[in-house]
Image (cartoon, rainbow, N blue to C red):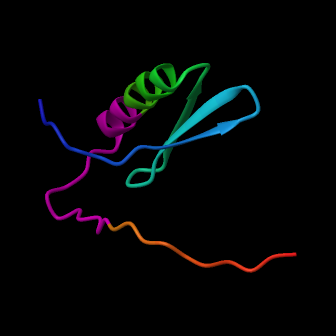
Amino acid sequence: MKTKILTAIIHKEEEMYVAECPEVGTVDQGETIEEALTNLKEATRLYLEECPLTDTDTSPRFVTSIEVSYA
């Protein structure tokens, strides 16, 4: 069994938390942050079983800030 560290982005939409893994594009939700993360892990695991990452898959990761002007 392979193990890989992936990114989870979580935000709240109305009454649910939405969790997304940008490296593979999986998304899931839950009533709590913990439930959303658990559901995302399962969705990502199932996705990777069908579409495994190769050793050449490298997703650069970085965090930055942006400035946005709006009305």
Span highlighted in magenta in the image: 44-61
Can you say which quadrant of the picture contains the C terminus? Answer: bottom right
Front position in the image: 11 or 39: 11
Q: Position of residue 20 (x, y in %)?
A: 50, 44
Q: Indicate the quadrant where residue 69 lies.
A: bottom right
Q: Is residue 3 left or right of residue 13?
A: left
Q: Residue at x 23, y 65 (%)?
A: 58
Q: Position of residue 44 (x, y in %)?
A: 39, 35
Q: Position of residue 52 (x, y in %)?
A: 27, 45
Residue 28 lies in the magenta-colored region: no
Can you say which quadrant of the picture contains the N terminus? Answer: top left
Q: Residue at x 19, y 55 (%)?
A: 54
Q: Indicate the quadrant where residue 40 lies.
A: top left
Q: Position of residue 26 (x, y in %)?
A: 48, 42
Note whether 33 is above or below 23 in the view shown: above
Front position in the image: 52 or 27: 27
Q: Is residue 17 left or right of residue 42?
A: right
Q: Residue at x 35, y 37 (%)?
A: 50
Front position in the image: 16 or 58: 16
